[in-house]
Amino acid sequence: MRILCNLPLECFDDRKNLRGVELCTFGPTDRMLVDGVHFPFDVAFDPSRGTIDELLAALPNGFEPDLVMLWWPDQEPLPAGLQHCPVPVVGVVSDYNLTLPTTTRLHPFFDVLLCDRAGVDLFEKLGFPDVRYFCQYTWKRPFHLRHPELLRPIDVAFAGNLNPAVQRDRAPWIARICGLESHGVRTAIHQGVQGRAYGDLLGRARIGFNLAIRGEMNLRAFEVPAAGALLLMEDSNLEVREFFEPDEECVLYGDDDFEAIVLALLRDEPRRRRIAAAGHRRVQSHSLGNRMPSLLELLAKPGPGRTRGDEVTALIGRAEAILTTWAAPEACAAAAMAAVRRAPNDARALNVLAVATLRWRQHAGGQDALALLQRASAADPTFLPPVWNLAQLLQGSDRADLHLAAADEALRRAHSAQNQEALTGPMLPFGFSVAAVDWSRGLQHAVRLQQPRLAANALRLERLPLRPPVAATSR
């Protein structure tokens, strides 16, 4: 199968190991930097500024893709006109727990959407026509090497995002790991460790702690055993038992037995080594190359195909999703302008242009954004995002009356919402603040239960900054 892809899959495995695949990758020349290593693309192309037709025209002679595979559309911009792509398009979505408000209108682009188990039902309820389970993560062959057992001075190690807004569920567990030091356990907790340094950290550990944010098999679930450490995973994980046999190839912990399990493993070194070695053997079968045949089999199954004909939603969906990617602010504004030109009175288009204007021009664009939000609020009296954004812009201003009126109207719209369409769209503040993450989680909960009014419980007006836009923080 010939696959055109926006991710250099060789960051996970050598191309020669990708059985059954002829791969062609695309992206800007200064990307992709993965774990500190630059992986070049086959075709230099900026999807935030170019169209799918321009991309297809730039492909090497003789390469005609069977499908386009686009990873992480909330992190990587989608090319313009993707809804008209002449070959099937597959999307791979990951951090929807953080970016759901700006990724709900991507269904016109994808014939198939791949996500973790928890996401299948969610995106089906959001109207995506064909959602399939696929574990998108694995270990990276260049970085994760097994160290000799005698060179493992760390008892329990963890390296990952410690942002308290994003990883709030992880914080108490990190505290419990640190608490093990009172029992003589040697622990190592790090953030920002990448590449070989990260692989070396896991390679020097006897146990690698993991807690997935969505109950998924994340990167760490494969990286720990690939480095030869014992994988310690939460017992509520939805996927781990499909990949490793508990107590034979990994160990699962719960809220009531975490410390006891760790101490027992460290006291019984032969058992710990046996499980770690079995996990290391098993993870070899989970390399990207070894899993490629099952992915191709999954993608070969026929489906209903992408939603056709909704040009306005496609333009708005691209403009909303591009806001959380690496795209330059002016490219975000151009995507939003394309939506407004097509639908000048659409509240969704006006709202995304207002937010893009703030990201591009920041405070200098405040008055223009204010006018756009006022138009959007009037254009659809049920649509929440523009009136919420009005409240944020006016907070701290000398028009307290307008701020309070907008805040009251935002709460009214949230509590009276009849469907998720009334709730979804970019909302201030930018980035991954506590308030933004709360809203994304609240929206997810409301969609899962098909009770949109429940999302109102996640609105935290008093927790937002007095002034809009700030740069996005780490996921």
Image (cartoon, rainbow, N blue to C red):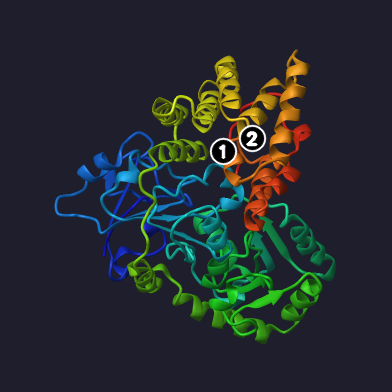
Q: Residue 63, relative to residue 290: is it above or below?
A: above
Q: How many marks?
A: 2
Residue at image x 61%, y 46%?
419
Q: Is residue 305 left or right of residue 200?
A: left
444 or 142: nearer the viewer = 444
Q: Residue 376, relative to residue 80: is it above or below?
A: above
- Where the N terminus falls, by quadrant? bottom left
Q: Secondary structure at mark 1?
A: loop
Instruction: Kindly give the residue lying farthest to the top in the view shown.
Output: 398
Q: Is residue 172 left or right of residue 367?
A: right
Q: Is residue 234 left or right of residue 329?
A: right
Q: Secondary structure at mark 2?
A: helix
Kindly identify which residue carries mark 2. Answer: 384
Residue at image x 46%, y 47%?
106
User: What crowding class fits label 2: few (fewer than 14 Cα within 10 Å), some (14-19), or many (20 or more)?
Assistant: many
Quarter of the image where one finds residue 237: bottom right
Q: Which mark is residue 425?
A: 1
Q: Name the spot of residue 147 as percent of width and height, x first.
A: 54, 72
Is residue 286 at all visible to an observer of this figure? Answer: yes
Q: Name the spot of residue 192 as percent of width and height, x first.
A: 59, 49
First along the sequence among labels 2 and 1: 2
Q: Are marks 2 and 1 in contact (CB under 8 Å)?
A: yes
CA distance separating discs 2 and 1: 8 Å
Q: Name the spot of residue 25 as percent of width and height, x first.
A: 31, 51
Q: Name the spot of residue 21 as percent of width and height, x first.
A: 28, 65
Residue type indicated by callout 2: Leu
Residue type indicated by callout 1: Gly
Quarter of the image where one finds residue 20: bottom left
